[in-house]
Amino acid sequence: MKKPIIGIAGDIFIENKVPVIGCEYDYFKNNYAEAIINGGGIPIYIPVVYDISILMDQLSICDGLLVPGGQDINPLMYGEEPKPLLQSTIPKVDKFQILLIKYALSSNKPILTICRGTQILNVALGGTLYQDISYAVNNPIQHNQLTELCNVSHSIEINKTSLLYKLFGEYLLVNSAHHQCINKLGTGLSISALAPDGIVEGIESKNNKFVVGVQWHPEMLLGNESNMIPLFQKFIEATNFV
Ligand code: MN
C-alpha cells in the first residue's frame, strides 16, 4: 500500500559570503525527513514559491503538511512593530508558509508544526507572538538549551483534553530551542501544553482532524528518553492512508 506523502514546508537560507552572496538556498534540516520516515510516511520538500496556483498544486500531491523550525517571524505579519530583541526574519518565507498553512487547513490536510512552525500556524490563524520570551514572563526558565537537542531540557504539563495527552500523558520532558513564544491565540486554537514558567509549549485546533503544534523539537528526540515517534505516527495515521 502506498505510504502517505508528507510535504515539508520550505525555508530559505540567504548566503552572505562572496562569491555567491545573495544566493537563496532551499534550506531543509534532514532530521524532519528522518522523523517522517520513522512515523511511516514519505517526506518530500516543498520549495518556497510565490505563485499561489503553483503552491496549491504542490500541496495537492501531499497527504499532510509539516511546518518546521526556523527564523523569527516578521512582527508586521501580526500587526506589531519590531522590538529590540527581535532576530532576523525573511518575510517572503513567512508569506509562503502562511499561505501553505491556510490551503492545508481549507483542504483539511493533517498539519504538524514544530517550533517556529507552531508560531507561524498561530499567526496564520490571526494570533500574535512575544518577540522574545523576556517580554512574556519575568522569570523564565531556559528555553534555549546549551546541550545538544537530542537531550531533554525542561518539563511541560499537558492539558488532559488534548491529543498530546493521549500520546504522552500529563507530564513530558522536552528539548527547547526558542526565544519567541505564543502570545494571543489564533482562531480555533487551544493551548495543549505549558512549561513551568507559563510559556506555551503546545497548541491544537479542534476544528480540524489533526492540527497539532509543538514548541519543542520532537524530530531531535527519536527513540530516546522522551520518544517522539508516536507523535509522527499519529500525524501520519491522520492522513487516512494507513
Ligand atoms: Mn521551551
Image (cartoon, rainbow, N blue to C red):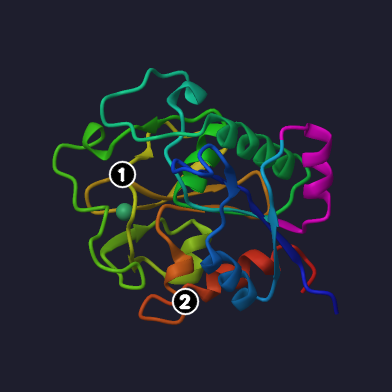
Q: Residue at x 55, y 66 (%)?
A: 30
The kind of secondary structure the magenta stretch mainly shows is helix
Residue 195, compared with residue 173, is above or below; it is above
Rendered-image quadrant of the C terminus = bottom right
Residue 20 is left or right of residue 2, and the answer is left
Circle 1 — which element? Answer: loop
Most distant residue in the front direction: 19
Q: Residue at x 75, y 39 (%)?
A: 106
Magenta includes 21? no
Residue 75 position in % (x across, y down) = 43, 25
What amino acid type is highlighted by mark number 1?
His
Mark 2 CB within 8 Å of ligand 1 = no
Residue 190, compared with residue 160, is above or below; it is above
Residue 200 is left or right of residue 12, and the answer is left
Residue 2 position in % (x across, y down) = 84, 75
Q: Is 102 in front, or is 70?
A: 70
Residue denoted by label 2 = 222
What amino acid type is highlighted by mark number 2?
Leu
Circle 2 — which element? Answer: loop
Q: Is residue 167 visible?
A: yes
Rendering quadrant holding ligand 1:
bottom left
Residue denoted by label 1 = 179
Residue 111 position in % (x across, y down) = 64, 53
Magenta includes 58? yes
Q: Which residues are magenta?
A: 50-64
Q: Residue at x 34, y 35 (%)?
A: 87
Residue 223 is left or right of residue 1, and the answer is left
Q: Earlier in the sequence, mark 1 or mark 2?
A: 1
Residue 89 position in % (x across, y down) = 45, 34
Q: Residue at x 76, y 68 (%)?
A: 4
